[in-house]
Amino acid sequence: MWIGLISLMPDMFTALTGSGVVARGIKAGKLSLELFNPRDYASDKHRTVDDRPFGGGAGMVLMVEPLRLALQAARDRAPHPAPVLMLSPQGAVFSQPQAVEYSRTPALILVCGRYEGVDERFIQRYVDAEVSIGDFVVSGGELPAMLVVDALARHIPGVLGNRISNIDESHLDGTLDYPQYTRPEHSADLAVPPVLLSGDHRGIQEFRRREALQRTFQRRPELLTRRVFNDQDRKLLLHCFEQVEH
Ligand code: 4G1
C-alpha cells in the first residue's frame, strides 16, 4: 500500500517510520509513505501557506493553492488512483471497520491541517472524506494521521510479525479486552487469578469472556448496544446485571 501524506511538518512522521509496526511494514516492502509539504509549493519568496480568515477572527487558515499543488504532486506519484482523506474534527470518528476498509485500498492520500484549519474550498473540491480521531483540540492533523496509518498498517498482510498478533476483531467490535497477566505468578502484592494457571481451557475461556463482558458493561456500556450476543454471553451478562442490584 502506498500512502501520500500532505503535511507542513513532515519531520513528525519519523515517529512513525523510525520503529514499530509501520517501520516494519515499510522494511518488508508492504507499505510505502511519501511526504508532500505544501510549503514547497508556495509561490512567494516567503513561502507563505496561510492567511487571515475572511470575516475576521483569531488565527490563520491554510490557503488552497499550496495544498492543491502538493496534492497534485502526491497524485502524480501515487501508483494507483488514491482517495483523499483529510484528518479533521469535522469528520465522523475513525473506527476499526474503517481501518480494515482503508487498508484494502492500494493507494491513499492523507491531508493534515494546521493552524485554525483549511480553506473550505480545498475540502469541497478535493477531499473525498474527513476523518476525526475524537472530540478534543489538537495542534495539527499529523498525530491523527499517524494514528490512522498505524491502525491501517496492522491489516496489510505481512506487516505484523509473530510477536505482534492482530487483536481479534470480533472482540474489538463489541467488547473490551479481558485482563492479561504474565510472569511472575506473584507481583505488586497480587496473585494471578488461579484459573489461568489451571490448564482448564474451558474455564479459562469462560473467565476471560466473563471479565471482558463485565468490564464492558461497567466501563463502556454503550458498546454493548451495538452487538447481538450468543447464549453463553447472555448468561454471563445477566450475571453482571444481577450484581448491580447488590
Ligand atoms: C474545533 C480533533 C476545533 C482535531 C473542535 C480531532 C477540535 C484531526 C483532528 C478543533 C483535529 C474540535 C482530529 C481543533 C484537527 C486544523 C489543524 C484543525 C488542527 C485542528 C473538537 C485544530 N482528528 N484539529 N482544531 O482541534 O485537525 O483528526
Image (cartoon, helix red, strand yellow):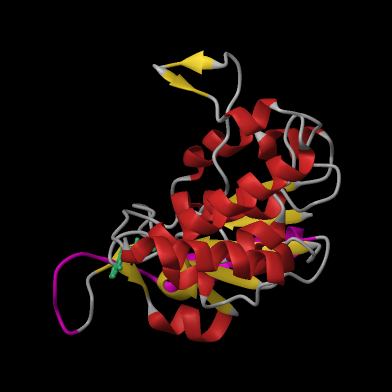
The magenta stretch spans residue 72: yes
Residue 76 lies in what quarter of the image? bottom right
Name the residue at 83% across, 60% down: 79
Which residue appears at 69% of the width and 40% of the height?
Answer: 204
Question: Is residue 59 covered in magenta?
Answer: yes
**Residue 68, picture quadrant:** bottom right
Of residue 54 and residue 226, the one placed in the foreground of this image is 226
> 40 above or below 201?
below
User: Is 78 displayed left or right of 98 in the figure?
Assistant: right
**Residue at the spot x=45%, y=49% of the render?**
143
User: Quick check: can you spot residue 156?
Assistant: yes
Name the side, left or right, on which 216 lies relative to 148.
left
In the rendered image of this protein, does residue 95 appear above or below residue 128? above
Where ligand 1 lies, by quadrant?
bottom left
Residue 192 is situated, as x and y percent measured from the top left of the image, at: 54, 25
Question: Image height check: is 16 above or below 94?
Answer: above
Q: Nearer the viewer, residue 196 or 94?
A: 196
Residue 52: quadrant of the picture? bottom left
- Count the labels in the image: 0
- Where residue 86 appears, as percent x and y from the top left, is 52, 69
In the shown orientation, is residue 69 left or right of residue 26?
left
Give x and y (percent) for residue 139: 31, 53
Residue 59 image position (x, y, % from top left):
19, 64
Is residue 43 visible in the rendered structure shown here? no
**Quadrant of the image for the N terminus?**
bottom right
Q: Residue furthest left?
A: 57
Magenta residue span: 55-78
Q: Residue at x 76, y 35 (%)?
A: 200
Foreground of the two, 141 or 213:
213
Q: In this picture, is 163 found above or below 205?
A: above
